[in-house]
Image (cartoon, coloured by chain):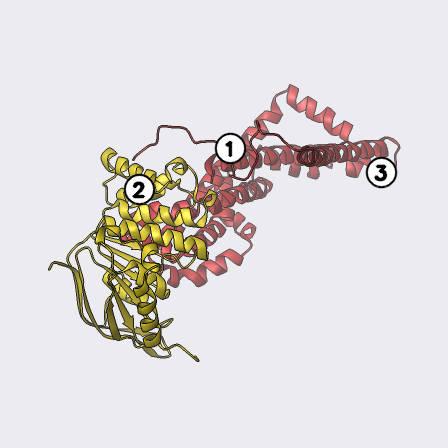
Amino acid sequence: MEYVCELKNISKRFHTINNETKAIEDISFKVEKGEIVSIVGPSGCGKSTVLSILAGLEKPSGGEVVVNTSNIGFMFQKDQLYEWRSILKNCILGLEIQHKDTEENVNKVLKMLKKYGLYNFRNYYPRQLSGGMRQKAALARTLAIEPELLLLDEPFSALDYQTRLSVGNEVGEILRKEKISTILVTHDIPEAVSISDRVILLTERPAKIKKEYIMEFSMCEGERTPMKCRNTTEFGGYFREIWRDLDVSGK
Amino acid sequence: MYQESSKLPKVENKDTMKSDEHVSKEQLEYLQSIKREKRFIRVSQILFLIIFFSLWQYAASKGMIDTFLTSSPKAIWDLMFKFIVDGSLFNHLYVSTMETIAGFFLGTSIGILVAVFLWWSEKVAKIFEPYLVILNSLPKTALAPIMILWAGTGFSGIVVTAASISVVVTTMTVYTGFMSVENDKIVLLRTFGANKNQVLRKVIIPANLPLIVSVIKVNIGLSWIGVIVGEFLVSKAGIGYLIVYGSQVFKLDLVMMGVFVLAVIAGLMYFFAAWIEKKLIKY
């Protein structure tokens, strides 16, 4: 099996003048090509730090990071669309930075916008779009550089519940169809269960891997969508199992 | 860079009614009430100006105020007419405006360049911060005599004085703006592999464009202050020269005319800047 990235015994400490915090202690996992992995865990346990380390934005204090691609897409909780750029201009931002904003690539982006129902809004400014559309535009911007590894840092948590469900469903479908290797950090267990192939549960700070779960649903791979997963009997089982292991009750 | 050929569509909120749809009576009334209010404000503004000058003129002609100290609209107008006819008003106006524009560009561009430099090197910024703070709180007009001695008593001295008034506050404001760009916006670019130069051009500058435009608006006024102060100190021509000369020979007509012309030209330049802002910032 081919892997896009691997973390080997990663640890991370944060330093301030007053003290040193151990955020991560010994985390190791691999992500297969085309696999969608979710990381869940208690709030503030260092989930996002794992992504930052993978993206090369932060150096680990110990351990080894192997990323078999230089083309990483990163998506944030807030869409981070630049309000002074039109939607299309926002979506080709990454291409511009990497000097790949050729006619051909821009046409690809336009096609993508068509698919996401954003084509008619391509010349609008971000503030004129709803939260769900903005987040889809942010996804288009991330996918425009055709990343081989996609890192999603709670990408739907700023959306209202209904939008989160529908955008989460759409994005999940896209990732699965395009076979994009993805790591999704979320605190929404149903979201993690419905979207991913595997869920990694972290402990409280300093974060270690508490348990891993393989998400298998009784449907053909081609038919699997997050929304359909939510309607299966397995869904409830996975949710209860992870919720029990997360053990946040009474805190 | 990729350019979209089609023009920007008319921006309309999804919820607003299109013009071809039926517009309710209530909506029409609402629109009319807004129009009415706008008109009322505009008319009141003009009326205020007319009443102000009328009262001034009335009081002056009835001898209720001492025209030696207050002048009168008619006297100012007559004087201005004379100055316009012999062309000297335009000469003074030209001198002052050129000094202001030069001082403005010098101060604003150096201010922004220094801000970019400080943003580029955080360490340099930290080292120079206390000095900038002191320079910023210093009344810059106190520096005017030094500037004029250093840069010359003519055009250049006045331009440098004008620039010195806006440069530090420009640096401080723009640098603060640069530093307060949301960090994730920069991290986003870094995930695309952007270098520092790209971060500057693609996010730091564009994110601060509205701020820079408002700095420009303020700097126009500041440059005028510098020019007038400079002309008070040394000059052979200019609006500041007219004002200071007028006060020295107790010709209040001349002083008032200078102030009036100054108000008009400064206002015009401000509206020009506001127009640029509208063209530049569409989002």
Q: Residues within 10 Å of mark 3 (few under 14, many from 20)?
A: some
Q: What chain does badge 3 belong to?
A: B
Of the two numbered discs 1 and 2 in the rendering, the one whose residue sits closer to the viewer: 2
Kindly indicate whether the residue at mark 2 contacts the one at mark 1 (C-beta within 8 angstroms). no
Residue ID for mark 2: A92
Find residue B53 and report its image quarter. top right
Which three-letter amino acid code belongs to the residue tagged 3? Ile
Q: Is residue A51 above or below residue A106?
A: below
Observer-nearest of B253 and A196: A196
- Residue B138: where, in percent of width, then height? 53, 57
Q: In which quadrant of the rendered image does the C terminus of chain A lie?
A: bottom left
Measured in 3D between alpha carbons, the distance from the residue under mark 3 to the one under mark 1, in whole angstroms, is 36 Å
Which three-letter amino acid code belongs to the residue tagged 1? Met
- Residue A205: where, in percent of width, then height? 32, 76
Q: What chain does badge 1 belong to?
A: B
Circle 2: element type: loop
Q: Is residue B113 visible in this depiction of the protein?
A: no
Circle 1: element type: helix
Q: Residues within 10 Å of mark 2 (few under 14, many from 20)?
A: many
Residue ID for mark 3: B65
Residue ID for mark 1: B98
- Residue B37: where, in percent of width, then height? 71, 36
The residue positioned farthest toward the top in the image shown: B85
Chain coloured yellow = A
